[in-house]
Image (cartoon, rainbow, N blue to C red):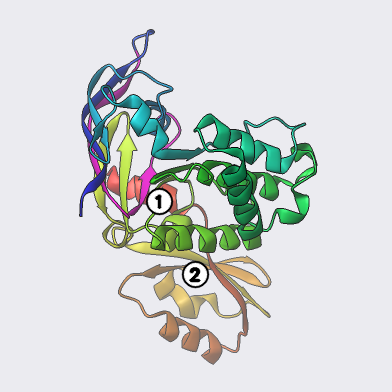
């Protein structure tokens, strides 16, 4: 399988002396769904900025599907669709016009742009809103509009910068399904996100960046396995007998909620059985906190 992205010894030093990237090496295979992870300021945005031509690199090389960023920039640009974190379209322009205008920038003739925009609007459940000003859309609809705008140019590589930030759970899962379908149809996707659940659901491989350096690069499965302990929040009809759950580091939060720790070698079914023996009925059972942050802490020990 060929590389969609090949980054070699990539460096970026800003005018104020800040070293944002300190010799990054990174490969993303064609057809992959790849996560680029890191805290704010780690260097993710700088990498995306360089890939899309918004930031000039200080050193190193970048290739996209074998095309050199420096020597064949226009060809590289045509292969990339970007969904930025911030909304950056005209809030007064009509929804379909935003998509058609984007297609025009890439030399797509209007009849083709109209046909493609209608297809995308239907796929992303925005067709009924095609003639309204974009400012009237909900936050989730605006996110989907940005995806449609990025895809209308028929990119080979889609870059998603926290595409589901601020989106409700139901819509997030709908967007996941659509992105999975696009990836299964051959689209290479590079994702940045703060949700480890999103990475687990969508991505096959991931790299973690810290202070301008790659600190981990592996399959998502292998990275997640680094987490030895997972903390859960359990909601029951009535909290009873915490002492009997000492092996799980169980702690009562209130009369119907407690937390516990499960190691990778502990069986969830066994835990549930023990809860039932104690006379408690489980109403909800979910991970606590930001698992992404815990993974960072484990990697940086």
| Residue 162 visible in rendering | no
The main secondary structure of the magenta stretch is strand
| 175 part of magenta stretch | no
Q: Secondary structure at mark 2?
A: loop
The residue positioned 25% from the left and 30% from the top of the image is: 62
Judged by depth in the image, the label closer to the viewer, 2 or 1, is 1
User: In the image, 227: left or right of 217?
Assistant: right
Query: In percent of the image, x 31 and y 20: which residue is there?
Result: 57
Residue corresponding to mark 2: 250
Where is residue 153? Give x, y as percent: 50, 41
User: Does the segment drawn in magenta span residue 20?
Assistant: yes
Query: In this image, 65 relative to 297: left or right?
Result: left
Q: Secondary structure at mark 1?
A: helix
Front residue of 52 and 155: 155
Q: What residue is pinned by disc 1? A: 294
Quadrant containing the N terminus is bottom left
- The quarter of the picture where residue 33 lies is bottom left
Between residue 1 and residue 230, name the one nearer to us: 1
- Vertical comparison of 101 with 190: above or below: above
The picture places residue 116, in percent across and down from the top left corner, at 58, 50
Circle 2 residues within 10 Å: few <14, some 14–19, many ≥20: many
What residue span does the magenta drawing correspond to? 18-41
Q: Are marks 2 and 1 in contact (CB under 8 Å)?
A: no
Q: Nearer the viewer, residue 217 or 74?
A: 74
- Please say if 37 is above or below 277: above
């Amino acid at each position: 399988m060929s590389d969609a992205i090949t980054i070699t010894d990539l460096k970026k030093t800003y005018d104020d002396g800040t070293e944002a990237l300190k010799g990054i090496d990174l490969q993303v295979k064609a057809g992959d769904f790849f996560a680029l992870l890191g805290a704010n300021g780690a260097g993710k945005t700088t990498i995306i900025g360089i890939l899309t031509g918004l930031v000039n690199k200080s050193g190193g090389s970048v290739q996209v599907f074998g095309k050199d960023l420096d020597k064949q920039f226009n060809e590289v640009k045509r292969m990339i669709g970007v969904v930025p974190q911030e909304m950056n379209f005209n809030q007064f322009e009509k929804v379909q016009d935003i998509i058609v205008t984007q297609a025009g920038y890439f030399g797509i003739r209007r009849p083709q742009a109209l046909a493609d925009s209608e297809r995308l609007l239907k796929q992303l459940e925005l067709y009924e809103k095609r003639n309204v000003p974009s400012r009237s859309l909900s936050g989730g609809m605006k996110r989907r509009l940005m995806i449609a705008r990025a895809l209308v140019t028929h990119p080979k590589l889609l870059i998603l910068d926290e595409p589901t930030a601020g989106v409700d759970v139901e819509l997030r899962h709908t967007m996941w399904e659509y992105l999975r379908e696009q990836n299964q149809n051959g689209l290479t996707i590079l994702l940045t996100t703060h949700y480890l659940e999103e990475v687990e659901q969508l991505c096959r491989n991931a790299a973690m960046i810290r202070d301008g350096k790659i600190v981990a690069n592996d399959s998502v499965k292998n990275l997640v396995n680094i987490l030895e302990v997972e903390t859960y929040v359990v909601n029951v009809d009535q909290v009873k007998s915490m002492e009997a759950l000492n092996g799980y580091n169980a702690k009562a939060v209130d009369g119907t909620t407690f937390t516990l720790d499960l190691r990778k070698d502990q069986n969830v079914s066994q835990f549930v059985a023990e809860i039932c023996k104690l006379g408690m009925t489980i109403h909800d059972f979910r991970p606590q906190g930001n698992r992404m942050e815990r993974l960072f802490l484990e990697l940086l020990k």
